[in-house]
Amino acid sequence: MRSIAKIMLCACLGGAVALAGCGKKEEKKTVSPSEPTGQAISRKETTVAVPDIVKGKWKAVKIGVTNKNNNKETDYFIDIGSTFTIPNTTLAIKVESFLPHFTMEGTTLTSATNDPKNPAAQVRITEGGKEIFKGWLFALYPTTHAFQHPVYGFSLVDFVPAN
């Protein structure tokens, strides 16, 4: 009889432990569709702050567009804030901002000085009216966060000061 009581007691304690575990709330993690399952990422929204020492000091950037099929690069001057459609394509590039000395301070992207020490252009590329890339082109580090398009490559070649 005592062994039956011990078994019942163990079963009750095991059930109580199991129920206590079930009552614990699970944290839900958001998984990005582009990330492998089970890898949650926490991304903070970044902001671009063009300092007064930079505002109005730069007119345009020169973007190199390479056709990977024939390895021919064509350079285009695009005014900052303007959109340019690449001839004979449905691709358009909008230059949103230019930071001559790109730095990141927390979640703020800015320019430490007006000297072109780490030039970067924020661009938005559309194809057939659909956005396919929004990010940065770096003159000194062209492969950093480089946009991968099946036919065209994009690079920041030069920058044009205002007057």
Image (cartoon, rainbow, N blue to C red):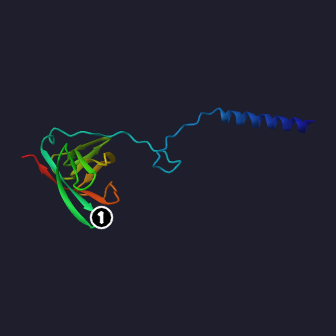
Q: Position of residue 91 (x, y in %)?
A: 27, 52
Q: Say if residue 142 shows up in the picture.
A: no
Q: Position of residue 122 (x, y in %)?
A: 25, 47
Q: Name the residue nearer the viewer: 82 or 119.
A: 82
**Where is mark 1, residue-wise?**
68
Q: Quadrant of residue 9?
A: top right
Q: Position of residue 45 (x, y in %)?
A: 35, 39
Farthest-out residue, bottom: 70
Left or right: residue 18 compared with residue 80: right
Q: Say if residue 16 shows up in the picture.
A: yes
**Relative vertical location of residue 72 with respect to residue 84 in this rendering, above or below:** below
Farthest-out residue, left: 163
At a point 66% along the width and 35% down the height, the residue shown is 22
At a point 89% along the width and 37% down the height, the residue shown is 4
Left or right: residue 135 compared with residue 33: left
Helix, strand or loop at label 1? It is loop
For the N terminus, give its image quadrant: top right
Tally the marks: 1
Q: Position of residue 72 (x, y in %)?
A: 23, 65
At a point 28% along the width and 49% down the height, the residue shown is 136
Q: Name the residue nearer the viewer: 87 or 143.
A: 87
Which amino acid type corresponds to the residue marked 1 in the rendered image? Lys
